[in-house]
Amino acid sequence: MTAGTAADVEATIRDLEESRYAAVISGDIEAFSAHAHPDLAYTHSNGVTDTLDSYREKLRAGYYVYHRIDHPVDRILVSGDTAVVVGEMHADITAGGTRKTLANKALAVWVRENGRWLLLAYQPTVLPEAR
């Protein structure tokens, strides 16, 4: 399998980002898991970091319920077998029984292993309120 051009990789990563967000909105934990690296570090905007297993368990238990997610991408940086997605994540969710609206800058790190791109890390940062 060839690495592809930078434009090919960027298109692939955009598709994967769309797919992983669609999976959590639809509650398809297995589809999300198929995109995730086994060593996933998934940080939430409250500072809590989940592993793949702990995040899946919270999804299964209904701790996180995603009602809407918008995730504009500012840019995708590719270096070898690593892609970094810089953008935002705006969402309506229920977390721990509390309905919330999120407005975050977001950073997602994808790595290519054995010809597959997998989400290794995710880190949101709360956007400051408009003044």
Image (cartoon, rainbow, N blue to C red):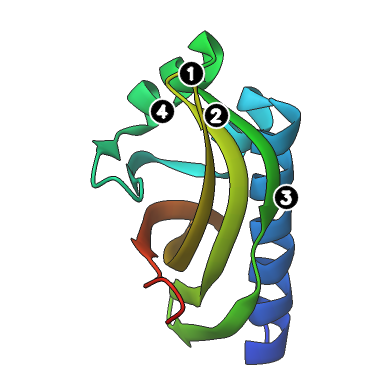
| Disc 3/disc 1 C-alpha distance (Å) | 25 Å
Amino acid type, residue under disc 1 in the picture? Gly
Task: Determine whether label 1 and label 2 are within 8 Å by CB.
Answer: yes
Amino acid type, residue under disc 4 in the picture? Tyr
Is residue 1 at least partly visible in the picture? no
Amino acid type, residue under disc 2 in the picture? Thr
Q: Residues within 10 Å of mark 4 (few under 14, many from 20)?
A: many
> Under tag 3, what secondary structure?
helix
- The residue most toward the top is 61
| Disc 1/disc 4 C-alpha distance (Å) | 16 Å
Indicate which disc, 2 or 4, sits on the residue closer to the N terminus: 4
| Disc 3/disc 2 C-alpha distance (Å) | 20 Å
> Under tag 4, what secondary structure?
helix
Residue drawn 39% across and 53% down?
Answer: 120
**Residue matched to label 3:** 19
**Residue matched to label 4:** 55
On the image, the x and y values in percent for residue 22 come to: 74, 44
Indicate which disc, 3 or 2, sits on the residue closer to the N terminus: 3
Is residue 26 at least partly visible in the picture? yes
Residue drawn 59% across and 59% down?
Answer: 90
| Disc 1/disc 2 C-alpha distance (Å) | 6 Å
**Residue matched to label 2:** 94
Q: Residues within 10 Å of mark 2 (few under 14, many from 20)?
A: some
**Residue matched to label 1:** 97
On the image, the x and y values in percent for residue 130 come to: 46, 78
On the image, the x and y values in percent for residue 129 come to: 42, 71
User: Which residue occupies the foreground of this view, 30 or 4?
Assistant: 30
Task: Determine whether label 3 and label 1 are within 8 Å by CB.
Answer: no
Amino acid type, residue under disc 3 in the picture? Ser
